[in-house]
Image: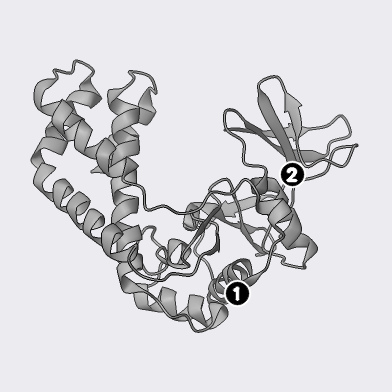
Amino acid sequence: TAVYRVTTNNGSDYFLKLRGGEFLEASVSVPKYLVDLGIKQVIPPLATKTGQLWASLGDFKAILYPYIEGRNGVETKLSEDQWVQFGAAIKKLHSTDIPASITKDVSRETFSSKWRETVKAFLVRIESEVFEEPVAVKMALFLKSKSSEILKLVERAEELAITIQKQPIDYVLCHADMHGWNLFVDKENALYIVDWATLIFAPVERDLMFIGAGIWDSGLTPDEEASLFYKGYGQAKINHAVLAYYRFERIIQDIGDYCKYIFLSDEGGDDRMQCFEHLQ
């Protein structure tokens, strides 16, 4: 994905997103549907002259949005009221019956072992492979020092995945990447939820696992986060095995992503060191 601030000849600003590779149509049609229902915490894409929510531009899909000045939820701490709004908006997402014609390309949670296998494969690889690029060398040494802990994470996630799949679980439409970097506050303190490219049908814990998990510095304790969020979301019956699974799996996926970025390419410049620091 590449994003741009586009300024027209008359001085109007727009936010342009170019999406290469796989394109999830629901990532633009679901936000539009939610806005049409009156949910204010979503920024809808602008329609083309022919009424579509995206256009083709070479090998990319081009999606245009209004340009909104503001900061993400990590750069600026959410107020108590914004936390309540956040909870209420996610509840509406989870409880809204969106037509299947809009969500037809959204996948369903399978508790796949893909990332667990990826991480195990990289742990095997770093035991025998010699790296020359400086960040890859540091990363390999660090991962070797943490390999037993990482394998415990993988083992626990695998145990939970088996346990969960034996249970009757309801699936709802989830945003699936619901952290502070995907929250946005404009100059008038309006709150928005952005980046809908990770939509999935999954247990509610797929979204709720971010609340009180310490994934970003919200300025609140985990209990304070949860108290305010659930004031807006309402009562929720949490399956703690599912919640734990998603927290383990998120860590494992991040490790796998960083390994692919550092070990499969020498590209990235200064971003490589930043990735290593995030992993640490």
Task: Look at 36% across and 78% down and name the residue there.
Answer: 223
How busy is the neighbourhood of tag 2: few (under 14 within 10 Å), some, or many (20 plus)? some
Amino acid carrying label 1: it is Ala
What residue sits 28% from the left and 32% below the top?
A: 259
Task: Name the quarter where the N terminus is drawn.
Answer: top right
Query: Which of the pair 259/73 is nearer the observer?
Result: 259
Q: Is residue 165 above or below residue 66?
A: below
Q: Residue 55, percent across and down?
A: 77, 32
Residue 41 visible in rendering: yes
Q: Is residue 260 above or below residue 83?
A: above
Q: Residue at x 42, y 76 (%)?
A: 226
Foreground residue, 74 or 205? 205
| Circle 1 SS class | helix
| 1 vs 2, front mark | 1
Q: Disc 1 marks which residue?
A: 88
Q: For the residue carrying disc 1, how many other residues have a C-alpha within 10 Å: few (<14), some (14-19), or many (20+)?
A: many
Q: Is residue 136 left or right of residue 246?
A: left
Horizontal and vertical percent position of residue 277: 27, 39
Alpha carbons under labels 1 and 2: distance apart: 23 Å
Total labels drawn? 2
Whether residue 43 is visible here, answered yes or no, is: no
Mark 2: secondary structure: strand
Looking at the rendered structure, the kind of residue marked 2 is: Tyr
Question: Which label was assigned to residue 65?
Answer: 2
Front residue of 74 and 241:
241
In the rendered structure, which disc, 1 or 2, sits on the residue that comes first in sequence?
Answer: 2
Q: Quadrant of the C terminus?
A: top left
- Residue for point 30% across, 27% down: 262
What colour scheme has been applied to the protein in the rendered image?
Answer: one colour
Query: On screen, 161 above or below 227?
Result: above
Q: Is residue 185 left or right of residue 170?
A: right
**Image disc number at residue 115:** none
